[in-house]
Image (tube, grey):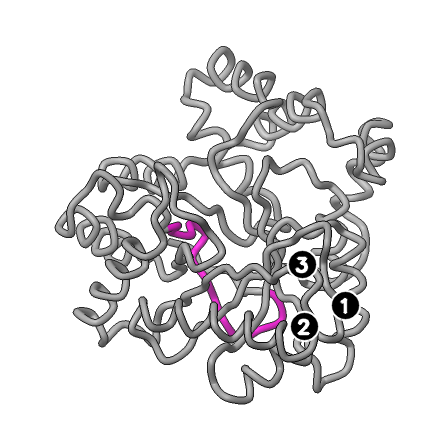
Amino acid sequence: MKKIQYGRTNLRVSQLCLGTGRIGYLSDRASAFEVLDTYVEQGGNFIQATSHAYLPSLECNPEKSESLVGEWLNANSNCREELVVCARIRCPQGASGLELEHSIRAQIELSLKRLGARYLDIVLLDWSTGFFPTYEVMSVLERLSDRGLLRYVGSVGFPCWRIAEWLGRGAQPSRMRLESAHLDGPFTQCCLEELSREHRVSLVVRWPFTDGYEPLFSTARQVFGRTSFQVGMAWLFSKESICSILFSPKLKSQLDSAIEASRASLSSEELSRIEAAYMNCALPPHCPMSGEFLKGDDSAAEAQGGGGLRVC
């Protein structure tokens, strides 16, 4: 798999990120190991653990999945340094001071215990409406980084204004800086593309797409005679702002399909038609740049070809 630089770090991650949330659910240890073995054999190195941020559900059990990933990491300890392992945490609303630090540290340590690891390459912060003061969280993560528990920080579901605030506070070398924005929903956050270009914040998009993409799927089926999976993957990989696509398979056969789809390619004409179909999809009303992106080809071309730093 092709490797992309992750934010402003020295990490290079594979374009297909393996989500482990479904590993171990309705599958045994052998099936989980088969998924992980296949992913690494095909050149993958970017693994997102379920972590303490998730509650057990029908398709996600953090204790079981992280423990299975930990068993696999222990059995394949020779490749740990080549892997980029991240986990999500969630901070309690209204917490500050020692309570906040204890909560963050406890979640990271629990994830490390399950994974049997000494450190996490990336800690992903889940967004909530009752988010805490940015400088406090940065200070806590900086202290934990000094202890060797984590290397970098990313965000999940953060609105653009919060990412911009974090980037501003992280301008000092002594502060932890956000290196990525992981999108839980469909890729419609055009303002994040701008942040990515200007500040080298990597974007990681979760597959599959959700509601609002029927025009894209219809174009894929009717025009190209390919699956929406193949066309969607090729379209996302064509975007310079996209660092990686998160895919969470249960079985090796599902992972094989994702790897095959990730190798699909589209011509410039095909990409233009897909982009046109994409612009017909509903953009979120809270996106401040949605009106600009709907003006016409000139705005889209300017957004794609404007100045600023780019992820490549």
- Judge by depth and name the residue closer to the eye, 242 or 100: 100
**Label 3 sits on what residue type?**
Gln
Q: Residues within 10 Å of mark 1 (few under 14, many from 20)?
A: few
Query: In terms of sequence position, does the residue under pointer 3 or pointer 1 come before the other?
Result: 3
**Label 1 sits on what residue type?**
Pro
Whether residues under marks 3 and 1 lie with C-beta atoms below 8 angstroms apart, the answer is no
Q: Name the residue under label 3.
A: 93
Residue mark closest to the camera, 2 vs 3: 3
**Residue 200 as seen in the image, left or right of residue 78:** right
Classify 20 as above or below 103. above
Q: Residues within 10 Å of mark 2 (few under 14, many from 20)?
A: some
Q: Name the residue under label 1.
A: 133
Q: Residue at x 61, y 65 (%)?
A: 7
**Label 2 sits on what residue type?**
Val
Question: Whole-Å distance between the Cαs marked 3 and 1?
Answer: 11 Å
Q: Mark 2 points at which residue?
A: 137
**Residue 271 as seen in the image, left or right of residue 69:** right
Label of residue 27 in the image = none
**Residue 229 as seen in the image, left or right of residue 275:** left
**Which residues are drawn in magenta?**
7-19
Query: In terms of sequence position, does the residue under pointer 2 or pointer 3 come before the other?
Result: 3
The secondary element bearing badge 3 is classed as loop
Image coords of residue 303 (percent x, y)? 79, 44
Image coords of residue 58 (percent x, y)? 35, 36
Classify 75 as above or below 69. below
